[in-house]
Amino acid sequence: MNKKTSSDTEIKKFSDMAAEWWDPNGKFSPLHKFNPVRQEYLVNKIAKHFLLDLDKNFSFSKINLLDVGCGGGLLCEPFARLGAKVTGIDASKNNIEVAKTHAKKTNLNINYLNKLPEDMTGAKYDVVLCMEVIEHVENVDLFVKSCAKLLNKNGIIFFSTINRNPKSYLFAILGAEYILRWLPIGTHDWNKFIKPQEMINYVSPYFLIHQETIGVTFNPLVNKWKLSKDTSVNYMSYFTKN
């Protein structure tokens, strides 16, 4: 059993693309399209959980948030603008350098660290985000355990990933990588995709209560993602800590 959550192959894969994180037409363009719907979902669920008033400026000012596998900071920056105290960690040093540079340009104070969740000690967070990262780790159980340990009591943790079934192979691998070329070939390994019930099974031993799993589907007619009851390909799950 691998005692680290990181994979050298995965780190190199994303490090090589790091310069394109903030290019909406680059290799991360699908994530730029996906970002608005996941961001809105996260903001609303966090605000409801902590009874935050979204009509107020810096409504997240009391929230300490950790983004695990933060990449170039596509989620860290919006939450920093809402006033949250944001820490972003990533296994790729290149990703972290890109994130730091962009945050400096936009005058945002974000704590970026080239670390794995199992290497984080002492700190606890109200919110932990694990978005589009768990399907790239080497040891899922260690990853979930490490992230759960970083959550404050009454905290909330989110996982976003891809279901594992024939449809997800057709859409997320053949369609997205080979036919539409939305993503570089080899971005995903279908065998690492996680079924929703498997996600619940991974998370539940760590005193985390499953609250919701919701699908996210792409509408090619309007070129947008939307929330859906269909969890057969992309989905998001969140859990709370007693």
Image (cartoon, grey):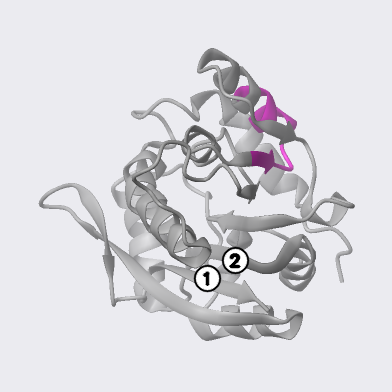
- Which residue in the structure is indicated by mark 2? 156
Check the image and report above or below for 9 versus 150: above
Q: Secondary structure at mark 2?
A: strand
Callout 2 amino acid: Ile
The reply to whether callout 2 and callout 1 are in contact (CB within 8 Å) is yes
Identify the residue position indicated by label 1 in the image.
238
- Mark 1: which secondary structure? strand
Specify start and end residues of the magenta stretch as a single range. 86-98
Left or right, residue 158 beside residue 64: left
The residue lying at 55 percent from left, 17 percent from top is 107
Quarter of image, res 134: bottom right
Q: Looking at the image, which is closer to me, 211 or 55?
A: 55
| Mark in front: 2 vs 1 | 2
Report the disc number at residue 126.
none
Q: Is residue 223 above or below residue 210?
A: above
Mark 2 / mark 1, whichever is N-terminal: 2
Mark 2 Cα-neighbour bin, 10 Å: few <14, some 14–19, many ≥20 = many
Which is more toward the observer, 59 or 219? 59
The answer to whether residue 91 is magenta is: yes
CA gap, disc 2 and disc 1: 7 Å
The residue at the point 89 percent across, 63 percent down is 3
